[in-house]
Amino acid sequence: MLLLTRKLGENIRIGDDVKITIVEVKGNHVKLGIDAPPSVKVHREEIYERIQQENRRAQAQQGGGASNPGGDDGPKPGTGTGNGLPEPSKDKEAP
């Protein structure tokens, strides 16, 4: 794991397309601003875990998650883009 120290207003770059800015620091809380293209999925950990849990539950209800041994079945119903995560809403996630 890479550990970085940043001050208020400073940035971190991930590749060419993702920029993380330290927006606010209050006690033990840090507010981050994340600029990323729509193709990059950004979720808080607890939201990501809930999405994964819902995807596993939906897959189990569809017959135990058996896949087509010959290839890709394509996107599963309710999984949005087919990458295991639902389509992002147009609204930003609230903290």
Image (spheres, rainbow, N blue to C red):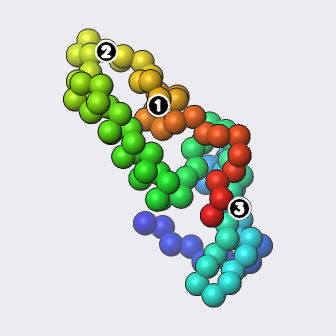
Contact flag, marks 1 and 2 (Cβ < 8 Å): no
Q: What residue type is disc 1 on? A: Thr
The answer to whether residue 66 is left or right of residue 87 is left
- Residue 51: quarter of image: top left
Q: Position of residue 70 (x, y in %)?
A: 26, 12
Answer with mark 1 or mark 2, whichever residue precedes in sequence: 2
Q: CA distance from mark 2 to mark 3?
A: 39 Å
Q: Which mark is drawn over residue 79?
A: 1
In the rendered view, does 48 fall on the left or right side of 7?
Answer: left
Residue at the disc numbered 3 = 33
Work out whether 57 lies above or below 18: above
Residue where numbered disc 2 is placed = 71
Marks 1 and 2, how far apart at CA: 18 Å
Query: Between disc 2 and disc 3, whose residue precedes?
Result: 3
Q: Vertical placement of 80 versus 71: above or below?
A: below
Q: Residue furthest bottom?
A: 27
Horizontal and vertical percent position of residue 21: 71, 65
Does dot 2 land on a helix, a strand or a loop? Answer: loop
User: Which of 89 and 41 lies nearest the eye of the viewer?
Assistant: 89
Residue drawn at x 64%, y 54% is: 93
**Of the residues shown, which amino acid type is indicated by label 2?**
Gly
Q: Is 88 placed left or right of 75 in the picture?
A: right
Who comes first in sequence, dot 1 or dot 3? 3
